């Protein structure tokens, strides 16, 4: 996303203030992709393709739950407060990702795994 797809991802870092971002087009793209995989996998009996389709679906659901909902709070009606260390760490890691709003120099791309260096210090 910080490569040639930056055109779509940019407004995720520099908010336009609108409710939807160009970055959301990724969701549509992956939804279409997973549908295509599952459909043609089932139609032609290609199991790995079906499996890949469900994999993309799971990734998309995970991205929405962790990234859009938990981190960016995009479901205004539901308030989420992280309790576990794992969730606190991945949320902190994504905060690091958003500390840079340019194409170059961004860090911490994953959203399900927080490298050790982004872990919140244990309080003693
Ligand atoms: Zn984000
Ligand atoms: Zn980014």
Image (cartoon, rainbow, N blue to C red):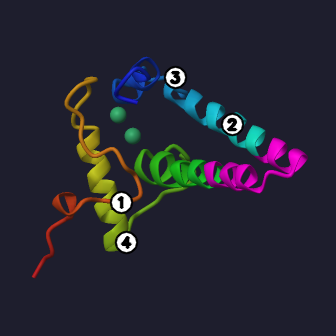
Q: Is mark 4 within 8 Å of ligand 1?
A: no
**Which type of secondary structure does the marked residue at label 1 adopt?**
loop
Residue sitting at the far top: 7
Magenta part of the chain = 38-56
Q: Which residue is mark 1?
A: 113
Q: Say which mark, if any, is on residue 83.
A: 4
Camera-near label (1 vs 2) is: 2
Q: What residue is drawn where x is 60% and y is 52%?
A: 61
Q: Say which mark, if any, is on residue 3.
A: none
What is the total number of numbered labels drawn onto the structure image?
4
- Give whichever of discs 4 and 3 has the lower sequence position: 3
Camera-near label (1 vs 3) is: 1
**Which type of secondary structure does the marked residue at label 4 adopt?**
loop
- Give whichever of discs 2 and 4 has the lower sequence position: 2
- 88 left or right of 68 in image: left
Q: What residue is drawn where x is 63% and y is 31%?
A: 29
Q: Which residue is mark 2?
A: 33
- 19 left or right of 34 in image: left
**Which type of secondary structure does the marked residue at label 2 adopt?**
helix
Q: Which residue is mark 3?
A: 22
In the rendered structure, are the residues bearing label 1 and label 4 in contact, judged by CB atoms less than 8 Å apart?
A: no
Q: Magenta segment: does it hold 50?
A: yes
- 17 left or right of 43 in image: left
């Amino acid at each position: 996303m910080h490569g040639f797809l930056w055109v779509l991802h940019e407004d995720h870092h520099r908010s336009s203030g609108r409710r939807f971002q160009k970055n959301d087009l990724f969701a549509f793209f992956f939804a279409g992709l997973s549908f295509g995989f599952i459909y043609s996998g089932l139609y032609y009996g290609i199991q790995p393709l079906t499996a890949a389709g469900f994999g993309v679906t799971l990734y998309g659901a995970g991205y929405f739950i962790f990234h859009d909902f938990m981190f960016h709070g995009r479901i205004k009606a539901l308030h989420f407060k992280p309790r576990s260390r794992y969730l606190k760490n991945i949320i902190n890691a994504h905060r690091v990702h958003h500390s840079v709003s340019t194409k170059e120099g961004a860090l911490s791309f994953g959203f399900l795994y927080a490298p050790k260096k982004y872990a919140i210090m244990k309080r003693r």
